[in-house]
Amino acid sequence: MGSIQKIVSTPVKWASRKIIHQTLLRFPGGNAHDPIACTYCPEMCRFSCPTAVISGNDAVTPSNKMSLLHQESRWPGRVANGAALWPLYDCTGCGRCTEHCVYGVPVADQLFEARSQYSLGKACDLASGLTDEMDPFGDIAEELGDEASASRRFETVRAKARHSVVEHPEARVVYFLGKRGVSAALSWQWVFLVEADHPVWKKLAERLAGRTWILYESSWLNRRLGRTAQTDLLVGRFENAGISILRAFAQGKDCIDAGGETPGYIQLQPQQAAEMAADWWARDALRAEGIISMSSRATQHFRNHLTDIEVFDLPQFLEAEFQQKEDL
C-alpha cells in the first residue's frame, strides 16, 4: 500500500509544483519589469529590504513601493491624494529586492528614476540647498530626484579627466569615472591590482593584528560594480598576511545594507539609517571585535553610530599608501 501511495503521490506533487509555478508565481502578462508585476508578487523581497525590516512599515516593502508607483502612473494624483509619494524615498538602492525578485524587477533603479517625477517636500528642499562643493559628483542630487543638477555636476568632473579610466601602474590604482555615484562612493578599484607579495599587506597585518575583524562589503556598490570577486581575493590576501578576518553572515551579492552609503537617505531618514548600522553590527557582534569597511562612507556612518567599535577604513588606508597623482 505504501508503495502505491508513493507512486501516486510523486506525480501529484510534481503536478502541484507545476501548477503553483505556472499560476501563483507567474506574471500574468505584459512586461515582467513593469511595476504592475509587483501586484502579482509573492513578496519574496519583504524580508530582504533593510528599510522595511528596520521601519516595520508595510508601506515601504519593495512590492508595495512598486505597486504605489504603478497605481500613481495609472491614476495620477488619486492614489496619494496630491500628497508626496514618500515611500519612494525610503530606499537606499542596495538592490537586495532585485536579487530576491521572482520576476527580476530592477526595483531600486526604477524607484530612483521615479523620484525625478514625484517630488517629496523634504527631498526637494535638500536638493535645492546642495552646492557644487557639497555634491561634486552629483550622486546626492540624483538620489533626491534632481537629475539636471546631478548630470551637470558629473559631467564637470568627467571633463577634468583625460580618460574615463585613469590608471597609474606605479601605484596600482584605478580611478573609476564610469558611472555617477560610483566615482564618489568607491572610486578605488585597487584589490585586483595589489600583488600578493606587495609590502602593503605586511603593513596591514601590523596595523590590524591583535583582534578579529568582520568585513563590511558595500551592498550598494556590489550591485553596480560586481565586487564579489574582489572581496574573495581580498579575504585570501588577508589570510595570507596572517590577519584574522571573518565574513559577515550576509555577504556577496546578498550582503545587507547598513544604511550609510547613500547620503540622501541618511539625511531623509536619519533614525532608520542609525538603526540599520546597529542592526548590521548586531548580527556579528559576538564573532568579531572590529569592522574593516570597504566603503569610506559606510566607515563614517559606523563611526557616527557605533562609537565603541573600532572601524578601519580600508580605502582610506590604501589611498594614503598609493597616492593618486592625477589632477581631477
Image (cartoon, rainbow, N blue to C red):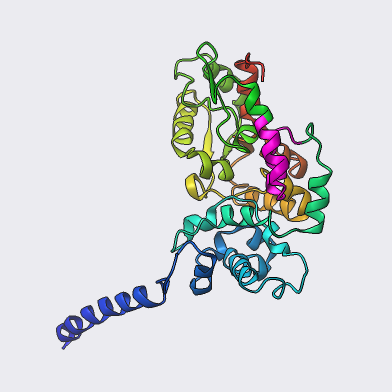
Choose between 279 and 16: the one closer to the eye.
16
* Quadrant into which the N terminus falls: bottom left
Choose between 147 and 228: the one closer to the eye.
147
Locate residue 89, reporting x and y percent. 70, 57
Q: Is residue 132 left or right of residue 326?
A: right
Locate residue 235, reporting x and y percent. 48, 32
Quarter location, residue 82? bottom right
Q: Is residue 271 left or right of residue 203?
A: right
Q: Is residue 44 above or below residue 282?
A: below
Q: Is residue 270 visible?
A: no
Span highlighted in magenta in the image = 135-155
Locate residue 9, reporting x and y percent. 23, 82
Q: Is residue 189 above or below residue 29?
A: above
Locate residue 302, reporting x and y percent. 71, 41
Magenta span has 323? Answer: no
Quarter location, residue 74? bottom right
User: Given the current orientation, which residue lies at the most extreme bottom position?
Assistant: 1
- The residue lying at 48 percent from left, 47 percent from top is 253
Give the overall secondary structure of the magenta segment. helix
Q: Is residue 275 above or below residue 158?
A: below
Quarter location, residue 4? bottom left
* Quadrant into which the C terminus falls: top right
Q: Is residue 99 visible?
A: yes
Magenta span has 136? Answer: yes
- The residue lying at 58 percent from left, 29 percent from top is 177
Q: Is residue 142 above or below residue 316?
A: below
Q: Is residue 99 left or right of residue 287?
A: left
